[in-house]
Amino acid sequence: MRKICVVVGSRANYSSIKSVMSAIQEHPELTLQTVVGASAVLDRYGEVSNLIEKDGFFIDEKFFMLLEGETPVTMAKSTGLGLVELTSIFDRLRPDFVVTVGDRFETMSATLAAAYMNIRLVHTMGGEVTGTIDESIRHATTKFAHVHFPSSEDAKQRIIKLGEDPDTVFNYGCPRMDLVKKEIENTHEPIFDELAQMGVGDQINFSKPFLLVSQHPVTTEYGDGESQIRATLEAVIQSGMQAIVLWPNADAGSYEISRGIRKFRESGESVKLRFFKNLPIATYVHLMNQTACLVGNSSSGIREGAFLGTPVVNIGTRQNKRERANNVLDADHHSDSILAAIKKQVEHGKFSQSTLYGDGSTGAKIAELLSKIEVPVQKVIYY
């Protein structure tokens, strides 16, 4: 039995790999090992570890690596702490493959630990082009990884251009589409009643149009987060629509956005807004499917939004150059620009579905491939 160790470090990590975890757990020739840390074990980020266990996964190890502050300095130091912790965990678990997701700083911790310990590394969602330090982390991880599961054909070709063997690069789509497809197809009853008991702020009437706001810090624009989220919230208020506002991730600058949200909320300006630390993946999918427009800079607007046809206003540089379908309209960090884009997207309504990032059958394909692929530990550049 091959042991496949999946490292989850955030709510975005989990939604990006959950279907793969399920497929590995169900595969007769694989054993799933689940390691959870970083923001995924902290209450102020919603403690995603509780959701993981609720979904039926056994957590083999938890680790703590985040230093307070959410600055470039603490992010760098946290990466080092993650490397120390994950090295010990991998030594205890002895996995055959380590699976790391995307481009966050905990991804780099897992990558370096596996590489120095001669453990074969599997990387999902590589090869994409965006803004922030994530760009560098993503491509660096590609050069350490032994098996690649990009989410689009363009990303696949970019990985090969980076010198990776084409026989190790598989475009099966994005695992997040599996969750979207399953939830939309299988859920027939409204699931929003629970939200009345969660979060803070004004209640949302889900029989009327609402906005969904998800905005994270841009690490290369550290210091601008508070003004950026204020511009977004001002535009949302000016739209006159009710809105759900989600807390940011744990990247450098998170505190600035959180502070901006708190100030806005406490000033009494947040009429028709309700704020949430974290939401179950299923709930978030249905909110995206029903919202009049997703506003912010989350990759979910690019990925899940394309599959669902959700109108999206993408703000700023965080998703620069990432492939997108025609459901995305860009805006800069000025309330007038954001408001104009919101009005245009709301007026347009739903877009047609795009399978740019997969058709919802990714997890099982990845698990099956991991059950049989053979790759040497020593990597060589392909040319």
Image: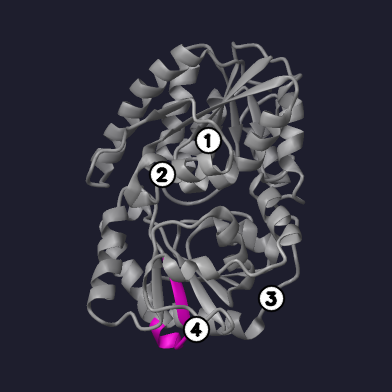
Mark seen at residue 133 = 2
Magenta region: 237-245
**Crowding at mark 4 (Cα within 10 Å: few <14, some 14-19, many 20+):** some
Question: Disc 3 vs disc 4: which is toward the camera?
Answer: 3
- The mark nearer the N terminus, 2 or 4, is 2
- Measure how far apart labels 3 and 2 are at the Cα level: 32 Å
Instruction: Please tell me whether mark 3 sits on a helix, a strand or a loop.
Output: loop
Mark seen at residue 139 = 1
- Say if the magenta span includes residue 238: yes
Question: Disc 1 vs disc 3: which is toward the camera?
Answer: 3
- Say if the magenta span includes residue 77: no
Callout 2–callout 1 Cβ contact below 8 Å: no
Instruction: Please tell me whether mark 2 sits on a helix, a strand or a loop.
Output: loop
Residue positioned 75% across, 36% down in the render:
364
Question: Disc 3 vs disc 2: which is toward the camera?
Answer: 3
Residue positioned 46% across, 51% down in the render:
131
- Measure how far apart labels 2 and 1 are at the Cα level: 10 Å
Q: Amino acid at mark 2?
A: Ile
Residue with the mark numbered 4: 340
Q: Give the quarter of the image for residue 290.
A: bottom right
Q: Give the quarter of the image for residue 208.
A: bottom right
Q: Amino acid at mark 3?
A: Lys
Q: Amino acid at mark 1?
A: His
Callout 2–callout 4 Cβ contact below 8 Å: no
Callout 3–callout 2 Cβ contact below 8 Å: no
Residue with the mark numbered 3: 350
Query: 261 above or below 176?
Result: below
Query: 158 above or below 369?
Result: below
